[in-house]
Image (spheres, rainbow, N blue to C red):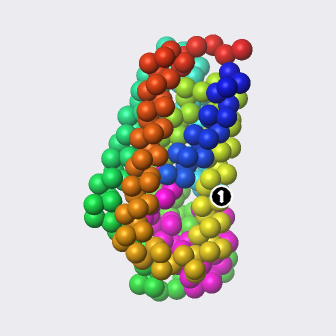
Amino acid sequence: MAELLPAALVQGVGVSAAHLMGVSALNAFVLRQALHRHHPLAAGTAGALSDALFILLGATGIGALLTGLPALAPLAAWGGAAFLCWHGGKAFRAARHPRVIDARATSQDAGPARQVAATALGLTLLNPHPYLDSVVLFGAVSAPFPAGGRTLFALGAIAASCAWYALLALGGARLAPLFRSPQAWRVLDVLVGTLMWAFALSLVWRALHGEVGKPHG
């Protein structure tokens, strides 16, 4: 089991980072708050907390449930690989016609920090997409790891999420021109797709070599 723990941590960081790097309502909102210097830390913190919730629901909920049923562990590995391939394919398709985030095109959001945080939470917690997407993704990908590995996977994923939202909140004003560049998004989408497919291959390799579904001591 010990040799799987570093892999779980790295995979948690990589999957989370690749999953976050895209054009989304929450990314645009945090970037906009940073550009207007209007409580960006409140927006970023709310985004990281909601993301941590989805990661924990996936890794300790669905992941633990699937791991508790050893016969389903190989299916979880193949399912996780399929999910990663699908996400990677979406990223490669997006690279052909990249979208951008232009925070200048929107008006400044007024209100105190708690209102900004509430808006950021609403963009995620009131959106059914993360429940159907993020929770299932993190659950399926973390399921093949033992309990300690799932914990490290979740910690790595949460760390990547915190780093991403800190980057948007604290560096958004300087990064704004980059987010308006289709070429930059094309490179980022290709990177995301490559990461997703690489992690999918690692799950397939472990499934083919019988490294999932076995008891760990």
Say whether residue 30 is left or right of residue 194: right
Tell me the chief SS of the magenta region.
helix
Q: Label 1, on which residue?
A: 162
Q: Is residue 163 above or below residue 173?
A: above
Residue 149, located in which quarter of the rendered image? top right
Residue in the image at 60% along x and 61% along y? 164
Residue in the image at 68% along x and 31% along y? 5
Position of the C terminus by quadrant? top right
Place of residue 78 in the rendered image (x, y in percent of width and height, measured from the top left)? 42, 27
Q: Which residues are magenta?
A: 19-47
Residue closest to the eye, 164 or 30: 164
Q: What amino acid does circle 1 point to?
A: Cys
- The question of residue 33 being in magenta is answered with yes
Residue closest to the eye, 66 or 193: 193
**Would you call the spot at circle 1 few (<14 residues within 10 Å), some (14-19), or many (20 or more)?**
many
Q: Is residue 150 above or below residue 68?
A: below
Q: Is residue 110 visible?
A: no
Position of the N terminus by quadrant? top right
Place of residue 189 in the rendered image (x, y in percent of width and height, measured from the top left)? 40, 58
